[in-house]
Amino acid sequence: MSTYHCHPGRGRTIQPHLSKPGARTTGQHQSWVPHGFSRGGCDSGGPSCPPPLKRRATRRKWASPQRWATRLTAAIAVAALASFTAADQVADRQIEVSVKTVTEDAVRGQLATLSITEGALIHTDDGEDQRIPFADLVRITTTVPISQHGRRDVTLSLTGGDVLYGRLAGARDESVVVETTDLGNIAVPLESITRIDSARAGQPAYRESVKWFQRAADADEDRILLTNGDVVDGFVTRIDADGVSIESSFGQTTVPHRLVVVVCLASSPPPRLDRPHLILTFRSSGRLTVTHLQWSGNVVEARLHRGEQIRIEAEKIVRVDVVGGKWEWLSTHRPISYQHTPMLSLGWEYANDRNVLGGPITVAGTVFEHGVGVHSHSKLTYDLKGAYRKFVTYFGIDDDSGPYADVSAYILVDGKPRFEKADVRRGTLHGPVRLDVTRANRIELVVDFGQNGDLQDRFNWIEPALIRP
């Protein structure tokens, strides 16, 4: 795999000891041009070469933080209103939900209303109405399943952690038009996009190339990973149905989508979100963050975290995650110390919301979004500052481990053992463990060797959380 660097005053070159199929020799170096593209007449320097590219003030780092939301929301609203004649006729229809709260028991029933100010009103299965304060909510899961049959030709990763699935349908100004199953056509400004993965990015043939490309990411340049493993870097000016247009040392080039695996875009830092806020996960089209939500029957009106309004059907929402209530995921906290003591192998780092190998947290066949992956022997220490009343967690050996995995798990509060479980093996989800941590200053999560030393001991603290009073 080769990395290509952009040199001022000359074409894109590769080191003399490297070569590429179809490379054109110029002097002592080889200037590589993707097959079917022209380089714009710059070979080895001189007055005909283009000047170094400068990042334009019209996109990304200097962009107005409100611009992308205005365009995104307008496109969503147009698509949504087109389908709302039928939806309004069934506006009173209520969605079956399971509500996770800061208490032990989930609440099941029909979601009548939901808002940040009033919380949730649930018509429970036993016929009672139950009002749940917003601060006590953790997650609302509907009976709407996530569908794999919608448009998923590309995956757009946006600033702030939002994700959209769909098909690239065209371009509008400095925006990418994405056709989604749930929200219709959406115009997403380039400055809000951090990455675009084509469908082939997840194929086994490109797995190693994508991993390498991620490690070699450059925060100051846009980069395109091609199907042959090569990389083109520069400044992406347009993405439409024809391909990705990029300004580089070759000049302006359009790379057709059939040659693109991943596009990484240098983007501005994510906006600071108001607390509380919510994350809406859609049936087929990804997830978006909102700072205001009014859910009534089958109609949901929400405000994006940039300030604009959207209106959608409740039956297209799979899940609502609450951020900023009493419940805080431990993976959003930084430990004050981490210790890993290997028996024979190399040291392992802990991983937030991933297993220790970087894959999804999976225990007993179930995938979990939140957690902390570690390897024995490990100790994570968190500063509580006396601000919490409960600590809650599940745990287990990751399914990615082998049959020899065997650990003991311990939890200490202010240095005193409060929980212990020996002989933890693959295939079983343990918990929940609920500990009173009122006025406690420190909690330690320890995973010790089992009977087989540290062999295959890939362990997960699953959905660990701190609960405020």
Image (tube, rainbow, N blue to C red):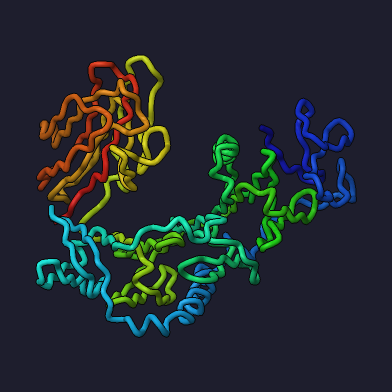
Give the percent coordinates (x, y) of residue 213. 59, 40
Give the percent coordinates (x, y) of residue 141. 28, 60
Q: Quadrant of the C terminus?
A: bottom left
Write down the quadrant of residue 399 in the picture: top left
Give the percent coordinates (x, y) of residue 25. 87, 35
Q: Is residue 425 above or below residue 38?
A: above
Q: Is residue 247 above or below residue 29?
A: below
Give the percent coordinates (x, y) of residue 63. 57, 66
- Comparing 294 with 292, the one in front is 294
- Comparing 171 with 218, the one in front is 171
Q: Is residue 17 above or below residue 313?
A: above
Q: Which residue sits at x=67%, y=43%? A: 227
Q: Quadrant of the N terminus?
A: top right
Q: Is residue 245 left or right of residue 329?
A: right
Count of numbered circles on the image = 0
Q: Which residue sits at x=68%, y=60%? A: 237
Write down the quadrant of residue 377 in the picture: top left
Q: Which residue sits at x=45%, y=55%? A: 148
Q: Is residue 61 above or below residue 335?
A: below
Write down the quadrant of residue 97 in the picture: bottom left
